[in-house]
Image (cartoon, rainbow, N blue to C red):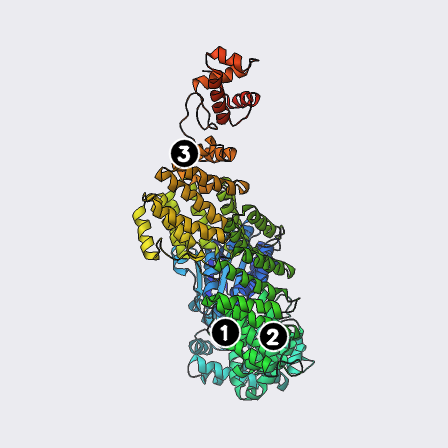
Amino acid sequence: MERSRLRKMLDRAWDTRLTILSAPAGFGKTTLLAEWLARSSRTGRAVAWLSLDQTDNEATSFWAHLVAAIRKAVPAVGNAALQVLESGQQPDDDILVELLNELGLSEQEFYIVLDDYHVIDLPVVHATMAFFVEHLPPNLHLVISTRADPALPLPRLRARGELCEIRSADLRFTDEEISAYLLGAVDTALTERDIAVLGDRTEGWIAALQLTALSMKGRTDVAAFIASFEGSDRYIVDYLVEEVLQRQSTETRTFLLQTCFLERLCGSLCRTVTGSRAAGEMLRSLDRSNLFLVPLDDRREWYRYHHLFADVLLTHFSDELQELLPGLHRRASAWFEQNGDRREAIRHALAGGDFESAAGLIELAIPELRMHRQDAAMAKMILALPVDLVKRRPVLSVGLAGALVSVGGFGEVDALLRDAEHCLTAGQGSVGSAIFTDRDQFEQLPGAIALFRSALAQMRGDMDVVIAQSQRVLAVAPSEDHLTRAGASGFLGIAFWTRGDLASSIRAWSHCLAGLRRVGHVADVLASSVAPVDICIAQGRLDEAFRLCGAALDLVVDGTPVTRGIADVHVALAELHGLRGDLASARRHLLASEDFGERGATPRYPARFRIAKAQLARAEGDGQGAIALLAEAERVYVADFYPDVRPISAMIARAAIMQGQLAEASHWVAAAGISADDELSYLREFQHITLARLMLAEGKTGSATIDFLDRLLQAAESGGRIGSVIELLMLRALACQGTGDMAGAIATLGRALALTEPQGYARVFIDEGEAMATLLKSAIKHRIAPQYARRLLKALGPRELEPTTHPDLLEPLSERELDVLRLFRGDLGGPEIARELGISLNTLRTHTKNLFEKLDVNNRRAAVRRAEELGLQRR
């Protein structure tokens, strides 16, 4: 049907960003687009067409299918995005940006068509589509066909002139188009009055006109037939469908009856459902007869019924289908299972009321659903089963419990686990009598039940139960069930970490990571590696923390899709480099984490990224910027099973102390409800150290502060938390300095330097400024880790130099020391040099000792060489 006025509208649409065809069912949207795009192919523009159905009403499926359609039009783009989506990862802006960039770099101009977009009602799909529309490259135009306006920014696009709209009023057939259409569809000539009546009664509704043409074929009383039309569109359609169906052959009616419930059809599926070998030919015959079939692919292998037609068929055949439909759904389920589409097989089994088969299929699907983190879909499937059936199948009870734990729905978990345990202990759990389909999952049930009980205890904060249940998992889970055992080890790691037993925690995490590696869960290895990294930092083992990050990143193969957790590892590396004072490397890893974005991140990433960024800002002198970033981190923080050993509120208080904003820090102390008299625990150690910092900043350097620091120090040392020990020693040294106890300050600082030098700590000293510079000078003077102290002193920043000194010298050389240095360059011995300078030999020895200390050498030759390196000379 040539509809030039609409084709011209569509031709002009290329200059806009989006075309919307919005009209009720039966207005010819799909037909118009197909005809127009067939003509548009002459322009050299390619077409990516996606016909949507209910299975696409999920973000991952929607975008995976859309990218696959795009790749048919432009094969060179979208490969990475498709791999990520097919792995089960949720789409986000980073995936779309990468896809849009690839599309924009393509030299091919093309259309993307989304047909039947009205089946999509999921907000996340609308949100990602809105982003996609807003960033379309100029070589691409999006066309959406829908029964209702989509939740996209249409007003904004309309205001900017970037929207082409074709609606019901545009799509309705005019009298001229009705005449032209029926002239080719009906054998009998129609008068202008007949055309006018049809136009008035159908209001140009194309589906009704198509049905009219079918019902008029072979009639001799066409005029009377048209004149008898009465009622609304609904009555007209009901009447016409009745007429059409009554005129079909028995075979055709039977085929329509037996297949109208299918959302998509192919010959093989129809043969299984109908039991007729001729089903494939019947499908092709319906296509040729234009009996409301819409092809879903270029090869015309897959079809769907026009939605309106399918609805009417279901209504018309409702009485007959009441008895037939369960069996038809079961046959469809069997076909989809045999052909590898287990999700569709489950849907039909549920729709057909074959709950036993559905239960078995769901059991078999659980491992794949877990691997792709489709926990919400799993829960929806199991919840569609009768409650009593789930209770009798322990694999399903535990599967639902695990799915609910993953999506944060703990309410029913305990009851589900009790149901599973009852099955196992009441005799039904023996292999001979249990109701299960997947033997491997059944044999893993005791371990899985204990694992989820550990998760419940973790949520309640009952670490005793967490440890007991996790240890039970390791006792009962089969040795080859690496995933369950890894989960239990992870929970043990969290429990020991919460208690401050870092040595036990790190051992448990090592077992967890090893198990995850064995089953190939790379994303989980990356995501879980950050926990032992944090523990190693708390233990003061920076080298081991770096090794863990490197081992995790080594699992990521170049060219593979972005893996969940990789961004978190880069943030951890940024924090580690920051601790060593390497700000350039810290900045590089932060940028790398941003490149991977939240598609390569865990829920903890948004807050942790901002914390690391704040640390960098503070190190670069932007204290207020650091506080703002920490406030933003607190806003986006997502709590999980991990202990919150460094509350962001305490970090903000520390940043305020460094900015001299002591009142703000005091408000935090009051809100946190902490004091120097509290009973100490690892979970509040960071907060108590922050309180100690505030006390020092307020000038409270007396015995009460030192006693508080000593209590904290003893607790940290007994727990092996060397990271805290280092910080506390440094603070104690500053407290001693404040009381004038320089001997105590130097001795305490020496202990801190001895712990930090092997691991290369720097930031913990640098942040303390001039007070620390004074202590470091004294340490060098007393030959306490002098080279390391010099490096830290240099990192504290340049200070005003005197004429005879150098940045690497603790103190300038005196005039007499420069004289001694000049004479060291010759061959004179000690007595000769003393006589030359007119001083005693003992005085020369004193000058020599001071000279050696300042140059950090132990003989004359080394002193001369060092002086030359520093460019020191007699002025």
- Report the amino acid beneath label 1: Val
Q: Is residue 244 visible?
A: yes
Left or right placement of residue 295 versus residue 724 in this view: right
Image coordinates for residue 39, horizontal then vertical, percent? 57, 60
Mark 2 or mark 1, whichever is nearer to me = 1
Tell me the number on the disc at residue 472. none
Nearest the eye: 106 or 242: 106
Image coordinates for residue 511, horizontal then vertical, percent? 60, 59
Which residue position is annotated with label 1? 413
Q: Residue at x 44, y 61 (%)?
A: 639
Within 10 angstroms of label 3, few (less than 14), some, or many (20 or more) residues?
A: some
Image coordinates for residue 860, horizontal then vertical, percent? 55, 21
- Report the amino acid beneath label 3: Thr
Which residue position is annotated with label 3? 774
Image coordinates for residue 183, horizontal then vertical, percent? 53, 74
Mark 3 or mark 2, whichever is nearer to me = 3
Mark 1 or mark 3, whichever is nearer to me = 3
Q: Earlier in the sequence, mark 3 or mark 2?
A: 2
Q: Are marks 3 and 2 in contact (CB under 8 Å)?
A: no
Farthest residue to the right: give it.
277
**Could you give the CA–CA distance between mark 3 and mark 2, rounded to whole angstroms?**
68 Å
Left or right placement of residue 404 versus residue 688 in this view: right
**Could you give the CA–CA distance between mark 1 and mark 3, rounded to whole angstroms?**
59 Å
- Report the amino acid beneath label 2: Glu
Q: Earlier in the sequence, mark 1 or mark 3?
A: 1
Q: Earlier in the sequence, mark 2 or mark 1?
A: 2
